[in-house]
Amino acid sequence: MTTTDTALAREAERKGTPRVKGPRVWLDLDQRELDDAYDQSKYAANRAQIQERRLLSSELARARLGEPMRLAYGASEIEQLDVYRTKRANAPINVYVHGGAWRNGGAAEFAFLAEVFVNAGAHCVILDFINIDAASGNLMMMARQVRSAVAWVYKNAARFGGDPSRLYVSGHSSGGHLGGCVATTDWRRDFGLPADLVKGALLCSGMYDLKPVRLSARSNYVKFTDEIEQELSAIRHLDRLNCPLALGYGTYETPEFQRQTRDFHAAVAAAGKPAKLLVGEGYNHFEMLETLANPYGLLGRAALELMELDRN
Amino acid sequence: MGGTNRLFETRLSRRTMFAGAAAGAAAAGALALTAGSASAQRCAGPPPPRVKGPLVWLDMDQQDLDDAYDQSVYAWNQPNIAERTRANSEAALKIIGKPERVAYGPSEFEKLDIYRTKRANAPVNIFVHGGAWRAGRSGGARAHLALPLVKAGAHFVGLDFIDVDAAGGSLFPMIEQIRRAVAWVHKNAASFGGDPNALYLTGHSSGGHLGGCVVITDWAREGLPLDILKGALLGSGMYDLKAPRLSKRGNYVHFTDEMEQELSAQRHLDRLHTPLILTHGTLETPEFQRQTRDFYAAVKAAGKPVELRVGQGYNHYETQETLANPYGFMGSALLDLMKLSAA
């Protein structure tokens, strides 16, 4: 369907004309349903409000914590990261990979996540990296930057008082996808670093198999190839997974974003590797992330537990 | 910040989620208006257009006013939040354990839950729940609000009290019970390791209204110190009952002139001896925003200590959720009020 056809079909539906389901393209979903299942705005009406809350909370958090250290991990302008430092010496490190459908977002607007870690005695590193449009649709380039950022943090932890042997990763949405790629990186082969470099990963509302994503409208801006689909589907590389996972999703997310996490969790468990499933009752995609900014929220609690900073 | 505020005012201050989403959809032809399903919730449609009737309160006709005292019109995600509240409260109970349940008065309603902190002689926060004066006797679903406070070194006392329906439509029995509960906590704080000279109160929604009535209590008549409460955090409450009386809430609250006068905190600021932090969200109904703004202005004009904190991008129920987060909008306000820091 063209964009106009789609718009007309939706207008007809709004007026009460039932929509005729098209041929199935993925599981029981037709093209429109699949497209919608990879479009958060169809399921999370309050996205704009939550974005505003995030920006304001981040401003307040930076006012309390002070401006972060800004360090470059690569050659290009975008390859930099923010470090919110804890006072403790040789402290564990959380590296956060932000989401935004691979297109949007930047480290500064996620400062609101740092306080939970910093006050619990861990450094919080928030990455900037190229977005998919600047990368001409090449997801591999994004994954490469994020992986190299994590490797850089491992090698340079001493620069900000971090303990490289306690390096953890967290990510949400497309950052959950990229975090999944980080957790299944072949560190020895690709970076000459220890295979168990990442000690744990909290991945929320991510994508772990790119096949249905490739079939959806997201392929209008992501230039999927067989290689990208294969390499960057974490669920297909569980042999390279060497750390415990905490996997979260909300019950008001799109059907596909719920399924992706459920399936990934089941596959990791079936591979005999440690994975905890966190189901956020009553939360949508964006609301889920807010629980990471609360040491007593679903994700915040899980993150501190994963990092053994749980003081309960 | 100026741009952000304007955005909220223009786009988000009315029944906006629907209207805003629908406008966007009309422009982009891009919004599915399907009703919710079991597995996932879809965005809802806009309200139908309507001819405005005679004005009954400020610039509002009867329906505008009724809607402005009906949270469900403005907070479309109330059922979702109720689900989260249940799940989060259960999870919190597993961490801090069941509260001690004590009777503070003679009736079956008059019970309170004490969530104890480990610190000795610790400050106490008394929580007055909301629910349009109707819901309530809420029992367990507040452990998630207690958790951050207990961890930060304060006791949390959640009150149960009669609801307006059981009280035959009168608000007086509710406020009498809550005042009795505060007096009970003052007299018995030491028995659970609480400092009777460090009592604070938090109320939200109709609990904000009732909390407002508590802080203007004539405590001297009860032989209690005027500053029995060292601070109160009142969120999204009502401080003048004239407008609620004109609204459809008058169908189940049997307002009288005496009730309206006595239980409008804003009319008794001479009896206020407790510093206040007042909060509301920018996505609340117009009246729930105005009530707090007007009360703040009146307290300030009376020269008494008060602070206004506005939650950008939060609706009525979402503001209370932030009380469960020590870094959240209301949670940090409470810690500031009680001079505690996040644990």
Image (spheres, rainbow, N blue to C red):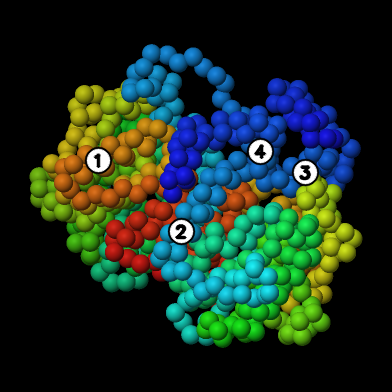
How far apart marks 1 and 2 lie (CA) works out to 27 Å
Chain assignment, label 4? B
How far apart marks 3 and 2 lie (CA) works out to 34 Å
Label 2's element? Answer: helix
Instruction: Let me know if marks 3 and 1 both belong to one chain.
Output: no
* Crowd band around label 1 with a 10 angstrom C-alpha radius: few (<14), some (14–19), many (20+): some
The residue beneath circle 1 is B297
Label 3's element? Answer: helix
User: Is residue B255 rendered to the left or right of residue B280?
Assistant: left
Instruction: Let me know if marks 1 and 2 both belong to one chain.
Output: no
The residue beneath circle 4 is B42
How far apart marks 1 and 4 lie (CA) works out to 40 Å
Residue nearer the viewer, A104 or B22: A104
The residue beneath circle 3 is A35
The residue beneath circle 2 is A59
Decide which of tag 3 and tag 2 comes sooner along the chain.
Answer: 3
Chain assignment, label 1? B
Residue at image location 67% in from the left, 46% down from the top: A40
